[in-house]
Image: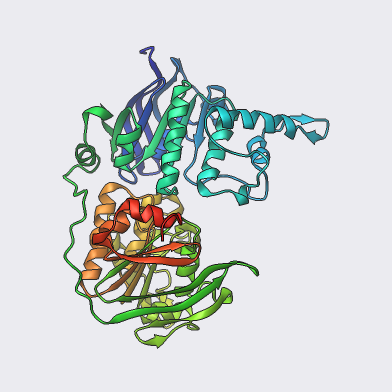
Amino acid sequence: MTESYVIEFKNILKRFGKVVANKNVNLSIKKGEVHAIVGENGAGKSTLMKTLYGLYQPDEGEIFINGEKIENHSPNNAIKHRIGMVHQHFMLAKPLTVSENVILGMENASGIRLNLKEADSRIKKLSDEFNLSIDPRKKIEDLSVGENQRVEIIKVLYRGAEILILDEPTAVLTPQEVKEFFKVIKSLVAQGKTVIIITHKLDEVMEISDRITVMRQGETVGSLASKNTTPQEIAKMMVGREVLLRVEKNDAVKGEEVISVRNLSVRKNKETLALDSVSFQICAGEILGIAGVEGNGQTELIESIMNLNSDKIASGEIKFLNADITSVSTFERLERGISHIPEDRHKRGLVLEYSISDNLILGQQHLFSSNGFLKQNAINRHSDERISSFDIRPADKKVASKGLSGGNQQKVIIAREFNRDFKLLIAAQPTRGVDIGAIEFIHKQILKARDNNKACLLISAELSEILSLSDRIAVLYKGKIVKILDSKKTSEDELGMLMTGAEK
């Protein structure tokens, strides 16, 4: 083993039943580098890193950590070898403080009382040392998403991690939070840490990584220095073909008004409004993008249009195709022609215990039934067609949705919602956690719908996505629309200023 490598995989094979997640994987990671692992959804990235962290055992192959061959690996063993992992979905107890979360499971007890004072001191020191800016006494529920992520990083550093695995670390961060996050990464590396990032965002890969390993269909297809490559080359390695990294669209041809929201106010709690007198319209054949830092009313807006929070609506009116639907049920809204890609796919989009096939007809079971019985042959044909058209992996309709990667879970939802005969598409974070090839496909589907005279409300934390897809952009700040702009006449910088209230 080469001494400069802190991690080395040799011929790793990992199966889950008939599915081969990793096959003949060979990968070496140097000490003190930022190493990006990129690939399509289902390419085996997360499986490989979970193997490194000891959550999975390889069926074949060898793992070396600092030159030592690892046998009977486990998370406890990984921690002993100073490896820490920050998962894509944070594992924090919201009612507890930062310190209480950090020491959870490894409490340093003094008699029957926890030594929180010592924990506070250590966490404050780590926070200062790595520019994490976290108050150990704050409760998790009072922190932003970006701060939650920094708490997760503190958790692994507190346990002595020298090698950090970060799974889709920027998936839920705003552009401003990404910049702060990159400062943290640079600080970690400056202190001698090794950072492994699993991601699909090629612009961020180019900015932050030293080396890149590309995976495709469970195998490593190449490793290269970031400074010697381009996003186009990486995308081609990931997908196996040329990928269009820019969105090409025709000018919008606007038709009749499809949805009108008038003076909508929604309560956050008894004292505070989450939405304050919000008004806008969307016509057939156009995409209205909503730009805003998460937590400024986007969720409440979506829930109001879909009638998922009727008890919180304080005032206002929602019209769809000139009919007042303010009090109409969610099911009726769907039946009238609204499709909904939810921002939280686990909470609103899937029943994780259900199969791909069942999730593909969720809310549409009545279309696949007769005399109270589901028509299984029709469901099977429908599932096979959707799985093929949207490249859902693995292509097995019987697999439970909880066993899919995040990107493939998203594809299931999008395949289902695009199957509706809709007039309005609400697309909330449509490409969150989705790889570059699938992003290209989803963008084309959204634009195809718009060009087929559908109206679209697009909510995304990705400003580049908002700018490239939208015809008009409404900026939401503290529950109010501060400005509606022509997408051709604005920029990320202007939107960023409006999103933070610095310009109105």
Label count reads 0
Q: Quadrant of the C terminus?
A: bottom left
Q: Nearer the viewer, residue 502 or 268?
A: 502
- The answer to whether residue 3 is above or below residue 372 is above
- The answer to whether residue 318 is above or below residue 357 is below
Instruction: From the viewer's perspective, tell me whether residue 249 is left or right of residue 183.
Output: left
Place of residue 435 in the rendered image (x, y in percent of width and height, measured from the top left): 31, 47
State the residue at coordinates (47%, 35%): 56
Residue 2 visible in the current orientation: yes
Colour treatment of the image: rainbow
Place of residue 15 in the rendered image (x, y in percent of width and height, measured from the top left): 39, 38
State the residue at coordinates (50%, 67%): 300
- Which residue extends farthest front? 503
- The answer to whether residue 401 is above or below residue 5 is below
Q: In the figure, residue 474 lies in which quadrant? A: bottom left
Place of residue 500 in the rendered image (x, y in percent of width and height, measured from the top left): 45, 54
Residue 409 visible in the current orientation: no
Instruction: From the viewer's perspective, tell me whether residue 133 is left or right of residue 320.
Output: right
